[in-house]
Image (cartoon, helix red, strand yellow):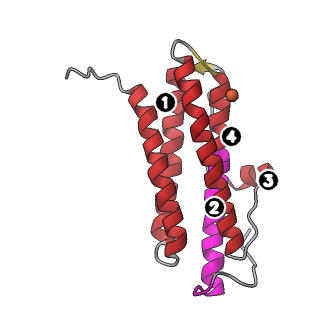
């Protein structure tokens, strides 16, 4: 649903402010989906490295919840209404639901790796588009993307089976 706010941040036209808010709404859905999906993996992961993966996920979940809050409040600052309901998320999302239920660490890490690829690619697209219009929002997304990419490295490091001796 397109924003219909009557004001936005100073220095942006109403049309541009609404456009940024609409783009951010997609990022809000992605971040809400991400922290719920990571919690699902935290609950369902099994196997020999259970505790490493189980415990690695919680700080990331807290971080991503914070990012959702940051994006939602930016939408509000832009004068629009952030939508956080699960029904709207499911209706608007463009990706498939996470497929792994109870599963071992490698299954979950591979699935999480692919979730991160999707979220980071879409964050980068939003940075490119929003960067043309609103550097303040762009800055928020850049900071988030750096941390999301760092966590994806943690996940990929677990999956990397190449011999470290070469
Ligand atoms: Fe827990």
Residue pointed to by mark 3: 85
- On residue 71, which mark appears? 2
Q: Are marks 2 and 1 in contact (CB under 8 Å)?
A: no
Disc 2 and disc 4 in contact, CB within 8 angstroms: no
Q: What element carries label 4?
A: helix
Write down the residue under mark 4. Answer: 36
Nearer-N-terminus badge (2/4): 4
**Residue at 63% from the left image edge and 43% from the top image edge:** 62
Label 2 Cα crowd, 10 Å radius (few <14 / some 14-19 / many 20+): many
Provide residue 9's location: percent of width, then percent of height.
64, 81
* Residue at 73% from the left image edge and 49% from the top image edge: 90
- Measured in 3D between alpha carbons, the distance from the residue under mark 4 to the one under mark 1, in whole angstroms, is 17 Å
Q: Which of marks 3 and 1 is nearer the N terminus?
A: 3
- Range of the magenta residues? 10-34
Whole-angstrom CA distance, mark 2 to mark 1, is 27 Å
| Image vertical order of residue 19 relative to residue 139, above or below | below
Q: Which of marks 4 and 3 is nearer the N terminus?
A: 4
Q: Viewed as shown, does residue 9 lie left or right of 47? A: right
Residue holding disc 1: 110
SS at badge 1: helix
Label 2 vs label 4: CA separation?
A: 16 Å
Q: Is mark 3 on a helix, strand or loop?
A: loop
Gap between marks 4 and 3 measured at Cα: 13 Å
The image shows residue 116, relative to residue 81, as above or below, that is: above
């Amino acid at each position: 649903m397109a924003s219909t706010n009557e004001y936005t941040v100073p220095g942006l036209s109403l049309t541009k402010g609404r456009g940024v808010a609409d783009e951010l709404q997609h990022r809000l859905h992605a971040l809400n989906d991400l922290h719920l999906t990571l919690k699902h993996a935290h609950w369902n992961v099994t196997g020999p490295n259970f505790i490493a993966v189980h415990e690695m996920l919680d700080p990331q979940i807290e971080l991503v919840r914070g990012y959702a809050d940051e994006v939602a409040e930016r939408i509000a600052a832009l004068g629009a209404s952030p939508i956080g309901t699960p029904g709207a998320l499911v209706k608007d999302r463009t990706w498939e639901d996470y497929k792994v239920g109870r599963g071992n660490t490698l299954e979950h890490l591979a699935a999480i790796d692919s979730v991160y690829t999707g979220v980071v690619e879409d964050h980068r697209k939003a940075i490119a588009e929003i960067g043309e219009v609103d550097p303040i929002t762009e800055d928020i997304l850049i900071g988030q993307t750096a941390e999301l990419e760092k966590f994806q490295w943690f996940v990929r490091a677990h999956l990397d089976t190449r011999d470290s001796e070469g």
